[in-house]
Image: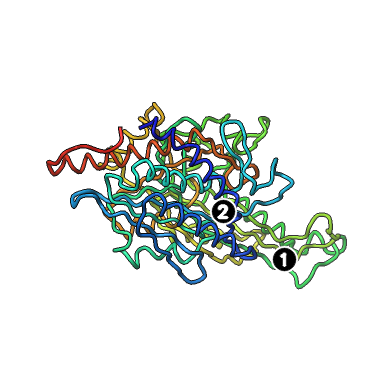
Amino acid sequence: MERQVDALMDGLRADLERLAAIPSIAFPGHPPEPVEEAHDLVVSLLREAGVATVERLDLPDTAPVVYGVIPPPEPDAPTVLLYGHYDVQPAGDPALWHSPPFEPTPVPGGLRARGIADDKSNVIAHLGMLRLYGGRPPVGIKLVIEGQEEYGSAFDAYPPTDPARFACDAIVIGDLGNLRPGTPTLTTGTRGAAEVTVEVRTLAEPRHSGEFGGAAPDALLVLLHALSTLHDANGDVAVPGLRREPWAEATYTEEEFRDLASIPDDLPLLGTGSLGERLWSGPAITVIGLDAPAVDQAASAVVPYARARLNLRFHPHQDPGEAQARLVGHLRAQRPFGIPLTVTPGDTGPGFETPTGGPAYRAALTALQEAWGTPASYVATGGSIPLVKGLAEAAPQAEVLLFGAQDSMCNLHAPNERVLLSELRNTVVALAAFVREYAADYRAAVGGPADGGPA
């Protein structure tokens, strides 16, 4: 099988470069034509790979979703749903890129471009598996290639409203990758997310700090005192009721994490416990925005108004409403200098954790070891993928697996995003081995032949 995948790599690389050259940014203010162009290219590539049924799903205010079907080769064969997305993040400041973000450029071992890892590499990995089997894999296939994942869309909540379309036995979410290059990784959980806005108003308008400072209540000072209660002296979240559990599986080394986050060696990390516990199985509260006078335009005046937006990440098993309510309740209970806060809850998104003991996971562990030559690790992620929960609700009996061609060092959402061709190649091998092993498991269960396909 590996030799057959190697023979496909030149064509897969060329198709990845074609797709990554399209600035398919499905954000407001960006032109829709490149998104449509990327959609049409994905449709064309899938049809060329043998997917006879390819449909376009159009939902309100949402870029088109590519939906494809390959029927199971036998009545007792399982069906696997493959997910990816063809839209990308905005490139950001082009001055921070070493090459134009939508001109795929060779780098040592791979290619650099916006979206080339997240998530166009995984779209191409799905394509590679289909090409390997000549469009006739040993399982049924459903393909869902989304066009507005990065910004969010009506599709997040759509699958449970149309469960027949998404019915399957296993779901492979190709929107993640390995903990580090060369380390096969299955992501088993994602933290939930919630936003909260907290604001303070103390004066009708600014007042001279020399004449009024010392007695007039400073709104920014009040806000800073309130924000300081969110963490203890070690940097651990101090809001009661937010779930935290030990993390016993694989995680980053401190050196890896410092490098990934660009943290100087002379600065401490926040919090206590393992990195996995701080990043994945425990809560995090980040101040993501602050409204206050800018330093360069500051006047000598008592600040009358200040506001902050907080992003809360919480344990996969904690209810989003409960987690957000814990943070809101904590802030409303604060009275810095006797002054109340106005606290407004915002959007929430659920976390997700999947069981790992079923036949799809057994097949995936075999496949990942075959592809990378070493046993797979389990990790979680602090980020959120809202659609995972929607697909799991649409197909509640399906096992959900998260793996792919990205790796944690690929600079996704950052300047100079890159993908390693070795990770892409091994992901194609893993997908092909996974459907082979998964089909054989089903055939063995019903007493049929266990022939799986390409060797």
**Residue 424 screen position, x and y as percent:** 47, 38
Residue name at image x 21 percent, y 40 percent = 441
**Residue 221 screen position, x and y as percent:** 71, 57
Amino acid tagged 2: Val
Amino acid tagged 1: Tyr
Mark 1 and mark 2 lie on one chain; the one further toward the N terminus is: 2
Which quadrant of the rendered structure holds the N terminus? top left
Residue name at image x 30 percent, y 57 percent = 395
Q: Is residue 135 above or below residue 60?
A: above
Residue contact between numbered discs 1 and 2, judged by CB atoms under 8 Å: no
As drawn, the residue found furthest toward the left would be 447
Q: Nearer the viewer, residue 14 or 85?
A: 14
**Residue 328 screen position, x and y as percent:** 52, 61
Q: Which residue is mark 2?
A: 88
Q: Which residue is mark 1?
A: 305
**Residue 374 screen position, x and y as percent:** 39, 27
Q: Is residue 135 left or right of residue 118?
A: left
Q: Is residue 451 left or right of residue 47?
A: left
Q: CA distance from mark 1 to mark 2?
A: 37 Å
Q: Is residue 420 above or below residue 116?
A: above
Instruction: Please tell me whether mark 2 sits on a helix, a strand or a loop.
Output: loop
